[in-house]
Amino acid sequence: MLKIENLHARVEGKDILKGLSLTVNPGEVHAIMGPNGAGKSTLGNVLSGRDGYEVTEGSVIFEGRDLLALEPEERAAAGVFLAFQYPVEIPGVNNTYFLRAALNAQRKQRGEPELDSMQFLKLVREKLKIMQISDELLHRAVNEGFSGGEKKRNEIFQMAVLEPKLAILDETDSGLDIDALKQVSQGVNALRSADRSFLVITHYQRLLDYIEPDFVHVLAEGRIVESGDKTLALKLEEHGYAWVAERDPAEVRA
Amino acid sequence: MSQSPAPLPFIDALRDAAGVRLPGSGQAWLDTVRRENLETFLADGLPDTRTEAWKYTALRALGQRRFAQGDPDAATRAFDPRALGLPGVDGPRLVFVNGVFRADLSRLDGLPAGLTLQPLSQVLERDPEPLRFALSRRYREAGDAFARLNTALAGDGVMLRVAAGARISKPVQLCFVGVPASGDLAWHVRNVIEVGEGARLDLVEHHLHDAPHKHLGTLVTDLVLQNDAHLQHVQLQNAAEESVLIRRGSLHLGARSQAALHVLELGGGLVRHDLHAEMRGDQARLDTRGVFVLRGRQHLDTQLSIRHQALNTASESIWRGVADERARGVFRGAIVVAEGADGSDASLSNKNLLLSSLAEIDTKPELEIYADEVKAAHGATVGQLDERALFYLRSRGLPYAEARALLTAAFCRAVFTSLPNETLRDHFSEALLAHLP
């Protein structure tokens, strides 16, 4: 589904990603962990096509297509979804209206028929079972005046409606209390399926108690320095990121 | 006075205008008013950018153009009346084509009790005496050159009165249509509107066109609200892309009267809109909301002036401007709280959005306070679309142009949320979106 090879990326003239390689197969959940400044969020932004991220080397193939050649909206239509670490407030744009416009824009790009408002409302009601957000939030401007938890839930709700093939969760746990974390995780888990993959970017192991990954990767200084199963996250939690750095590279590769 | 040996074509084309017969010609006082105004205009010429009110709008190019005065064929020009329809607006209607009243396109049957609605041309021919005061008004400011020209040459327009206590439930629609003629022509319209004591009026002013043309239209509108009167005034300006449209409104508010103005300006090549509001009675309230959306090489200049001159009056003004491509927008908002106008509450916000690096918007809020216990606030900004918001929308699948349009419409929306006619409000949003490139 996703094949990242030797990815190098630069932000404001500074090299952040320095040869990152990663393969994600359909249905897999990969956690990307790492200390601050390791390049975790840069990875999410490069994959979703944000301006200001310059790829200097390497390739990203998504479903057989050169992902890096696509505009952000084309990536979305192809099935890439980024749950933002800091969802943007957009005053004056109604949440439901926006979501319908986004879904229909994606369907149009894929050559699928657009949904009318009745069909869309039916879909919304269905998806509310996965990620409950209040009627009031549905009818407010996008993220405007939402609490931190409401913003993150809104991201997952959008994901539920847009049904991406690859969901990138960028520090979705940041700023969430334990109840909100559980709710958001339940929403994500409900969306797991055999043909939907997840890239869960997080600083803390805590999120992975609720969203159980198939693979855990440690990102440090722009590269993946260690990969393992979910027990790797527990080791990190116990020993801290310094533990990875202190270990012999040969041992890491073994 | 130095007389240039080769006068500007614009002025030269007006030399013969004095001899043209207009509705009401032959009335001694009206002939005098018209002649004097024309002479003053010809002597002073067009204002240049040294005149403060025209600082950002140069009229050099206009001065080089020649316009025929009036459209002799206006009465018979074909125009599809369906274009006049506005959703949520189904009341009486007065239509002018190239500045001339068209009974065939208007809807004046069964006017509600208390409403007088007539074309000015008819009033001038039958009995102009009641309009003597309004039409004799002198415009002394250097910036008011077009008001003088209008006073000299206007032969038609709207005469509207709402009797004291009358509540006109259906909106009254005033349509000003520009239609191509064999050449460029100038038309001038004068509107005199009065809302009687305790009366209510909904007014929809619609400027539209059916095909490209380069006419010049001037409109001078006097609006008087007697004590306790209520006015909702909506203006939708969709004039021809290369036309010149110059409007001057004056609004006088009596005690406890309330006026709400909503303006959407989309059309025209060179557009000027002056609004002078005077809060003359205690506790009068004025809300103005306006937005312009410009593209191509459009140039639009809004000059809002609000004068608080009675006790406990309030005004709130929210204006937005959007300019794309090479368009240029100007907004000047001046609030004066006169001596003795204690307890005034005035606020003015003007935010502008540049969608292209070649577009320009100049904004100038001004506040002058000569009274005590006044609440006043004003602010103006010029900015660009929020890149983070743009990326957020695109990351959800909205193409760039659609995301940009959605954000631009959202930026403008604050201006229309207070428009009570919901159907019309939706239409405004759609018209605005359709105008974005």
Image (cartoon, helix red, strand yellow):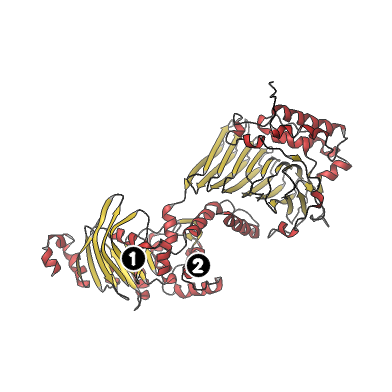
Residue A230 as seen in the image, left or right of residue A44: left
Question: What residue is drawn where x is 18% and y is 61%?
Answer: A241
Which picture quadrant has residue B330? top right
User: Considering depth in this image, is B195 or B342 the residue closer to the camera?
Assistant: B195
Whole-percent x and y of residue B174? Answer: 74, 50
Mark 1 Cα within 10 Å, few/some/many (few <14, many 20+)? Answer: many
Residue A22 as seen in the image, left or right of residue B216: left
Question: What residue is drawn where x is 49% and y is 72%?
Answer: A111
User: Considering depth in this image, is A51 or B69 the residue closer to the camera?
Assistant: B69
How far apart, in angstroms, are the residues tagged by discs 2 and 1?
A: 21 Å
Question: What residue is drawn where x is 85% and y is 39%?
Answer: B24
Residue found farthest to the top: B1
Indicate whether B239 appears above or below B57: below
Query: Tag 1's secondary structure?
Result: strand
Residue A3 as seen in the image, left or right of residue B220: left
Question: Mark 1: which amino acid?
Answer: Leu
In the picture of the structure, the residue carrying the numbered disc 1 is A169
Numbered tag placed on residue B437 in the rendering? none
Question: Mark 2: which amino acid?
Answer: Arg
Camera sees residue B116: no
Whole-percent x and y of residue B215? Answer: 70, 44
In the picture of the structure, the residue carrying the numbered disc 2 is A100
Give the total of numbered labels: 2
Q: Earlier in the sequence, mark 2 or mark 1?
A: 2
Please tell me if label 2 and label 1 are on a single chain: yes
Which picture quadrant has residue B2? top right
* Quarter of the image that includes the C terminus of chain A: bottom left
